[in-house]
């Protein structure tokens, strides 16, 4: 996207106004100018951010021995909550502290080992100014994150981070839209810097997101998602195919696991094998045993293998399959894992 044309001043509001009073519509050229303006104001932030100040802020959070609390009012409050949640997902002890609730008892959660980060565009937010002396009395370390120079909040906190703001994209320079975008970018980028400094591994990250697709892929093992015991479609190799048609279809696996007397896996017999047997054998089908027509060299998987490995194995050449028998190191059948089961588990 190109930069904002020089002829369109940040303070020229004409392109914000819809020329038609009869119908409401978005002018494509105006929309592009909105995004170019926002890009310009965000670039101003990146170009003027004090990295040494940001480094001190990030190192302070990294060295925290207690909980990192975030607070703010209005839109800055929503941003503070989001940044806190990001840190929590990375394994950092963090929480949002409502300035209003803090003054009505919640400040009791603060201790001398904690850090309180106060987000405010103006730095003159009344609710935060009232919170400061109470938080100081609890011994917490206070950091203000503001965009106006010479504000009241920065003067009473232990440290201040200045977030450079040229202006809001709002035509009146009032609605906090560019300033909140800057706050979000700043907070989340610092969070990733902390993630890097803490050497958070992929597995550790996944452990904090067990319900997400990434977490499931890195946490779930075959034994966690396989069918077992009475859910298994089992038969003996001497059983007649004709007698096993119900077992083949009733367990929803599209196959039968063929076993011997000691529960060792002999092979598999699928609905595809059934169709091929019927076509090739005709009336002889009624005299065939499962053991005569089963696949005696099926793909198998260990219960301790990762579930995502099972999916990869199912999809591997020469042709994909929709299930894998799960056997232990003695080739004893203990389960079956299906593609449908993996998908249902969110993998």
Image (cartoon, rainbow, N blue to C red):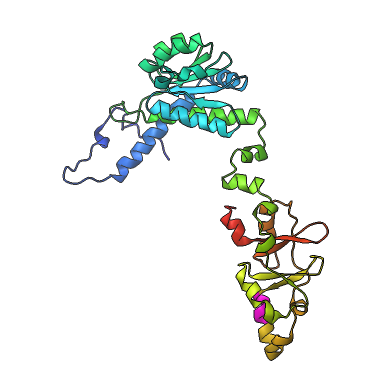
Q: Is residue 163 left or right of residue 214?
A: left
Compare residues 301 and 195 and report the one nearer the observer.
Answer: 301
Tell me which secondary structure the magenta stretch mostly adopts.
helix
Residue 22, located in which quarter of the rendered image?
Answer: top left
Q: Residue at x 75, y 67 (%)?
A: 298
Q: Is residue 128 left or right of residue 20?
A: right
Percent across and percent down for residue 62 are: 61, 22
184 part of magenta stretch:
no
The quarter in which the N terminus is drawn is top left
Give above or below for 330 relative to 287: above
Q: Residue at x 82, y 65 (%)?
A: 262
Q: Residue at x 57, y 34 (%)?
A: 89
Percent across and percent down for residue 324 are: 70, 63
Extent of the magenta region: 271-276
Give above or below for 308 relative to 88: below
Q: Residue lying furthest bottom in this view? A: 283
Compare residues 145 and 89 and report the one nearer the observer.
Answer: 89
Q: Is residue 334 left or right of residue 100?
A: right
**Is residue 154 something that shows in the picture?**
no
| Number of numbered callouts drawn | 0
Residue 329, located in which quarter of the rendered image?
Answer: bottom right
Q: Residue at x 42, y 20 (%)?
A: 99
Percent across and percent down for residue 200 are: 65, 33
Q: Is residue 21 left or right of residue 34?
A: left
Percent across and percent down for residue 149 are: 41, 14
Compare residues 106 and 147 and report the one nearer the observer.
Answer: 106
Compare residues 116 and 242 and report the one nearer the observer.
Answer: 242
**Is residue 76 something that shows in the picture?**
yes
Give above or below for 80 relative to 335: above
């Amino acid at each position: 996207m190109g930069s904002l044309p020089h002829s369109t001043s940040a303070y020229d509001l004409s392109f914000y106004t819809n020329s038609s009073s009869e119908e409401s519509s978005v002018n494509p050229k105006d929309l592009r100018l909105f995004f170019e303006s926002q890009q310009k104001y965000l670039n101003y932030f990146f170009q003027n951010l004090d990295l040494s100040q940001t480094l001190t802020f990030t190192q302070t959070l990294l060295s925290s021995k207690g909980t990192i609390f975030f607070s703010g009012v209005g839109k800055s409050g929503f941003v503070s909550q989001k940044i806190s949640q990001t840190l929590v997902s990375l394994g950092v002890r963090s929480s949002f502290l409502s300035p209003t609730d803090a003054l009505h008892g919640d400040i009791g959660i603060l201790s001398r080992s904690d850090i309180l980060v106060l987000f405010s565009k103006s730095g003159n937010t009344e609710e935060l100014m009232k919170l400061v002396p109470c938080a100081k009395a609890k011994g917490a370390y206070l950091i203000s994150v503001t965009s106006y120079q010479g504000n009241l909040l920065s003067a009473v906190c232990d440290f201040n981070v200045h977030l450079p703001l040229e202006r809001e994209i709002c035509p009146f320079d009032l609605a906090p839209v560019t300033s909140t975008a800057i706050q979000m970018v700043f907070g989340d980028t610092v969070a990733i810097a902390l993630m890097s400094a803490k050497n958070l591994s992929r597995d550790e990250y996944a452990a904090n997101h067990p319900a997400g697709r990434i977490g499931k892929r890195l946490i779930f093992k075959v034994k966690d998602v396989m069918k077992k015991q009475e859910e298994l479609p089992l038969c003996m190799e001497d059983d007649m195919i004709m007698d096993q048609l119900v077992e083949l279809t009733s367990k929803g696996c599209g196959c039968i696991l063929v076993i011997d007397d000691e529960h060792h896996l002999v092979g598999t017999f699928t609905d595809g094998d059934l169709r091929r047997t019927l076509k090739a054998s005709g009336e002889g089908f009624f005299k065939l045993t499962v053991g005569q027509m089963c696949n005696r060299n099926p793909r198998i998987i260990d219960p301790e293998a990762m579930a995502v490995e099972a999916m990869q194995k199912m999809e591997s050449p020469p042709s994909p399959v929709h299930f894998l028998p799960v056997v232990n190191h003695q080739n004893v059948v203990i389960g079956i894992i299906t593609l449908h089961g993996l998908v249902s588990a969110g993998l």
